Image (cartoon, grey):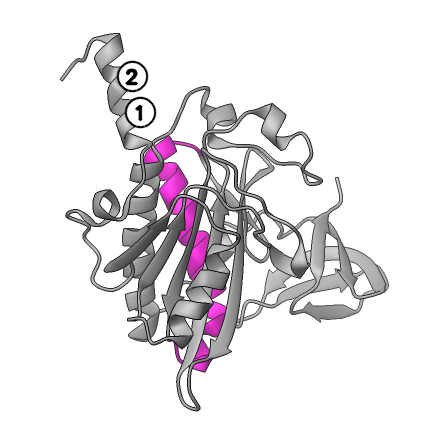
């Protein structure tokens, strides 16, 4: 169906509006997103997710914010979410053996969603930064805790740069971009959130039932085969990222020939 320019503009504006009702209406998700809490502004969606988890919220609860003022990324880095971006956190109660798979699941879901909704090829920089055209468009932070002596929870925080321009990214330290900058137009945040929750729901169901996302995640890693610099605390070394182990650890061949396993360090591409 063709729409006059003015009508089409209104449709895009409507699709950029977020609310719990719009997100969940007809959502094809069995677990992730069955309960959605929307806030116009929060300090951190992960902080709310952790509070909800400890209070006994159902598994699959998702916190979505229109704006986030004190979000955090990996290694305690700041991740602000101005209006026009996406900030959300999902609460899951996974078995401890699945925690490493959650990193793969979340980054894969984001990459799949960007390709489906925005039509942009997406790659992953180990372990879970999502890139478009070599620039970071999404950061993911997974935090765990204990609700009781037997129930562990994971808060999966996702921050995606959507409808912001270069001015909003000017103070960012990393080489970042947004879907708006890469497509040249606004992208529906509502479609992105709904597609993301459905994809996460499917992948989580797969890994809970014994499936693996390792190969698909590995195939999207832009890090493999590249010269990298690894920083772990005050120590640093360089080498070639050769492969990933079954638990997602990065295997780096140092210049002296030693093969080193990287579990949680900061890995940057040497270009």
Judge left or right: residue 177 versus residue 36. Answer: right
Q: Is residue 162 above or below residue 65?
A: above
User: Is residue 216 in view?
Assistant: no
Q: Rate crowding at label 1 as few (under 14), some (14 to 19) or many (20 or more) other CA atoms within 10 Å.
A: some
Pick the residue in front: 244 or 198. 198
Q: Residue at x 68, y 57 (%)?
A: 241
The reply to whether dot 1 and dot 2 touch (C-beta < 8 Å) is yes
Q: Quadrant of residue 175?
A: top right
Q: Is residue 57 visible?
A: yes
Q: On screen, 114 above or below 266?
A: above
In this image, 239 relative to 216: left or right? right
Circle 2: element type = helix
Q: Position of residue 210 (x, y in %)?
A: 33, 75
The one nearer the camera, 25 or 174, is 25
- On the image, the x and y values in percent for residue 224 come to 62, 53
Question: Which residue is pictured at 47% across the width and 73% down the height?
Answer: 99
Which residue sits at x=45%, y=33%? 84
Q: Which residues are magenta?
A: 94-120
Q: Which mark is residue 9?
A: 2
**What separation in Å lies between label 1 and label 2 (alpha carbons)?**
6 Å
Residue 166 in percent (x, y) is at 60, 25
| Location of mark 1 (residue) | 13
Q: Residues within 10 Å of mark 2 (few under 14, many from 20)?
A: few
Q: Quadrant of the C terminus?
A: top right
**Residue in view at x 32 percent, y 55 percent:** 37
């Amino acid at each position: 169906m063709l729409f006059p320019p003015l009508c089409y503009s209104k449709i895009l504006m409507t699709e950029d509006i977020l609310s719990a009702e719009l997100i969940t209406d007809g959502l094809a998700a069995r677990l992730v997103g069955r309960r959605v809490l929307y806030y116009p502004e929060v300090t951190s969606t992960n902080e709310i997710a952790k509070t909800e988890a400890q209070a006994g919220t159902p598994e699959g609860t998702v916190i979505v914010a229109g704006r986030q003022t004190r979000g955090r990324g990996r290694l305690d880095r700041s991740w602000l979410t101005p209006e026009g971006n996406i900030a959300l956190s999902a609460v899951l109660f996974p078995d401890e053996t699945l925690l490493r798979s959650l990193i793969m699941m979340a980054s894969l879901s984001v990459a799949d969603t960007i390709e489906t909704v925005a039509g942009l090829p997406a790659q992953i920089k180990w372990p879970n930064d999502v890139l478009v055209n070599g620039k970071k468009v999404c950061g993911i932070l997974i935090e765990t805790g204990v609700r009781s002596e037997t129930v562990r929870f994971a808060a999966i925080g996702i921050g995606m740069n959507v409808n912001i321009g270069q001015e909003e990214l000017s103070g960012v330290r990393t080489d970042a971009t947004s879907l708006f900058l890469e497509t040249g137009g606004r992208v529906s945040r509502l479609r992105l959130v709904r597609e993301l929750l459905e994809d996460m729901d499917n992948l989580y169901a797969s890994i809970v039932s014994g499936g693996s996302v390792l190969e698909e995640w590995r195939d999207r890693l832009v890090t493999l085969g590249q010269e990298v610099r690894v920083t772990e605390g005050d120590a640093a070394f360089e080498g070639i990222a050769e492969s990933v182990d079954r638990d997602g650890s990065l295997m780096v061949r140092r210049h002296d020939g030693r093969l080193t396993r990287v579990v949680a360090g900061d890995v940057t591409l040497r270009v």
